[in-house]
């Protein structure tokens, strides 16, 4: 049940645009030194600004330049850079020059507001001894960013980082930067960029190693960690990552992927509840949502409802290869006269070997499409009911598992905390419950 291509390519493209929109794009700074030995600093300063401003990553910017069939260098015209920036959906374009002389580095940068076509220029000079940490004030005051590296991050480590990122993005050579990541475990931008590059090149196990180092509030890191687990078919951990993501960003992609993990874990009813929490808005129904609802209905052997939903999907989108397989599967099992099963529908084409319905589910790599303020009440009630049933049957472990899922979505959900405190003797839950209702005394769970 990996990510398929026919439906997801469109979703990936649109999602990448949404993610990029509003973020700056930064180009390599031109070397004014006349010294080829410091050429790496052009990409180094680009990385520094990207990490400080949460800008579009170097690899994405390089891909956009490649698609324009122009050399990735400082010789690009401003007009070409603006075209690339607009294609990436960026709000700002940052470029500039640097020079190294007498043990000092001078950086001049220009920041363009793309829509307004206004520019802001600034410059600074600092000693190479203490670089890049001695740029922190300039980053905060003039660039309006946040200095991203540990203060112990040395100039030599920064050079290894910049060269390693460039080699990784261009040649897929991760040796140098992975060696650095083992030496400097607390550098958040290094872990994020390395994890994302490894993910984008299909090294999911290694990517997860670095993404797990990111803060628990890093939404994109959580989502991509979940996607690593999906690719590694570790759906239990994947579900937890997507639930954590939903705690910070109520977006469709995380709900869809949590449902996919549940389906892979043979909980189709729970998967259906997740997908039903996504409300349809007028005519703008997301085709991915319709398709996956159809798959989940088929997994529950509701063949005719699955075909009905699939019909809506095909009318909204198109008959993808996966949709044909799903229709063939349902038609082969339903013993019905559904229009999708009619002989005059050659697109269905019953195959000799029926696919596994679980393999047809489509995960979304859309990553946070924006906070959609989803109402996850039904999902919470589902797990509260499962916990109550488990406690009734004497299965405390299953009850705790269900209640933890509620708390992933809402860490202060009172009913879940109360059940954990009163029935599972969870001391942390009792403490949280007492803070929520200080006038009440939580049950004594001392042993």
Image (cartoon, grey):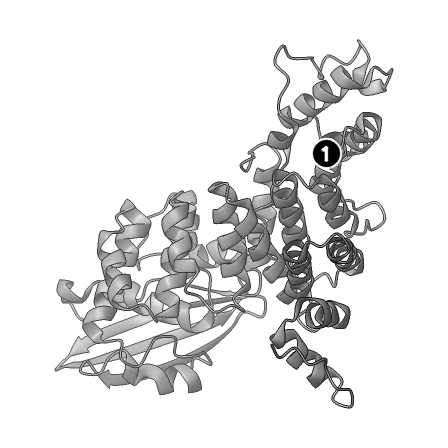
Residue appearing at x 31%, y 60% in the figure: 74
Vertical position of residue 136 compared to residue 420: above or below: below
- Looking at the rendered image, the quarter that the C terminus falls into is bottom right
Rendered location of residue 298, percent (x, y): 74, 30
Vertical position of residue 422 compared to residue 442: above or below: above
Asked where in the image residue 378 lies, by quadrant, the reply is: bottom right
**Is 37 on the left-hand or right-hand side of 132?**
left
Work out whether residue 328 or residue 164 is closer to the camera in this orientation and state it.
Answer: 328
Asked where in the image residue 9 lies, by quadrant, the reply is: top right
Residue 375 in sight in this render = no
Q: How many marks?
A: 1
Vertical position of residue 42 compared to residue 145: above or below: above
Rendered location of residue 374, percent (x, y): 75, 60
Residue appearing at x 53%, y 56% in the figure: 86
Asked where in the image residue 351 lies, by quadrant, the reply is: top right
Residue position for label 1: 317
Disc 1 residue crowd, few under 14, some 14–19, many 20+, Cα 10 Å:
some
Work out whether residue 439 or residue 361 is closer to the camera in this orientation and state it.
Answer: 439
């Amino acid at each position: 049940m990996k990510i398929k291509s026919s439906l997801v390519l469109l979703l990936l493209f649109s999602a990448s645009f949404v993610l990029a929109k509003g973020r700056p794009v930064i180009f390599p700074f031109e070397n004014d030194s006349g010294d080829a030995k410091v050429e790496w600093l052009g990409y180094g300063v680009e990385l520094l600004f990207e990490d400080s401003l949460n800008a579009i990553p170097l690899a994405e910017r390089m891909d956009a330049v490649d698609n324009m069939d122009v050399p990735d260098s400082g010789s690009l015209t401003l007009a070409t850079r603006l075209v690339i920036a607009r294609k990436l959906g960026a709000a700002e374009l940052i470029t500039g020059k640097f020079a190294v002389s007498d043990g000092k580095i001078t950086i001049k940068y220009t920041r363009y507001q793309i829509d307004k076509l206004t520019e802001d220029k600034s410059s600074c000079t600092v000693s190479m001894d203490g670089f890049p940490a001695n740029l922190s004030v300039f980053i905060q005051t003039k660039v309006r960013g946040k200095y991203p590296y540990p203060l112990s991050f040395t100039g030599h480590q920064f050079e290894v980082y910049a060269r390693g990122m460039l080699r990784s993005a261009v040649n897929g050579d991760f040796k140098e930067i992975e060696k650095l990541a083992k030496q400097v475990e607390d550098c958040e931008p290094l872990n994020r960029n390395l994890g994302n590059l490894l993910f984008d090149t299909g090294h999911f196990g290694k990517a997860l190693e670095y993404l797990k180092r990111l803060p628990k509030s890093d939404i994109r890191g959580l989502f991509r960690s979940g996607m690593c687990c999906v690719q590694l078919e570790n759906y239990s951990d994947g579900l937890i990552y997507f639930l954590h993501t939903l705690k910070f960003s109520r977006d469709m992609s995380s709900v869809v992927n949590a449902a996919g993990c549940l389906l892979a874990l043979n909980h189709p009813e729970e998967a259906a509840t997740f997908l039903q929490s996504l409300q349809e808005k007028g005519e703008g129904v997301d085709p991915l949502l319709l398709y996956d609802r159809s798959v989940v209905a088929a997994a529950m052997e509701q063949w005719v409802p699955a075909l009905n939903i699939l019909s809506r999907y095909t009318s909204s989108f198109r008959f993808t290869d996966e949709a044909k397989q799903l229709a063939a599967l349902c038609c082969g099992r339903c013993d019905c006269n559904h229009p999708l099963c009619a002989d005059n529908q050659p697109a269905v084409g019953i195959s000799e070997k029926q696919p596994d319905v679980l393999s047809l589910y489509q995960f979304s790599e859309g990553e946070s499409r924006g906070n959609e303020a989803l109402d996850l009440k039904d999902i919470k009630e589902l797990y509260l009911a499962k916990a109550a049933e488990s406690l009734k049957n004497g299965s405390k472990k299953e009850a705790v598992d269900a209640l933890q899922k509620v708390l992933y979505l809402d860490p202060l959900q009172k009913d879940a905390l109360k059940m954990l405190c009163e029935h599972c003797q969870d001391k942390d839950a009792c403490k949280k419950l007492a803070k929520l209702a200080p006038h009440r005394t939580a049950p004594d769970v001392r042993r």
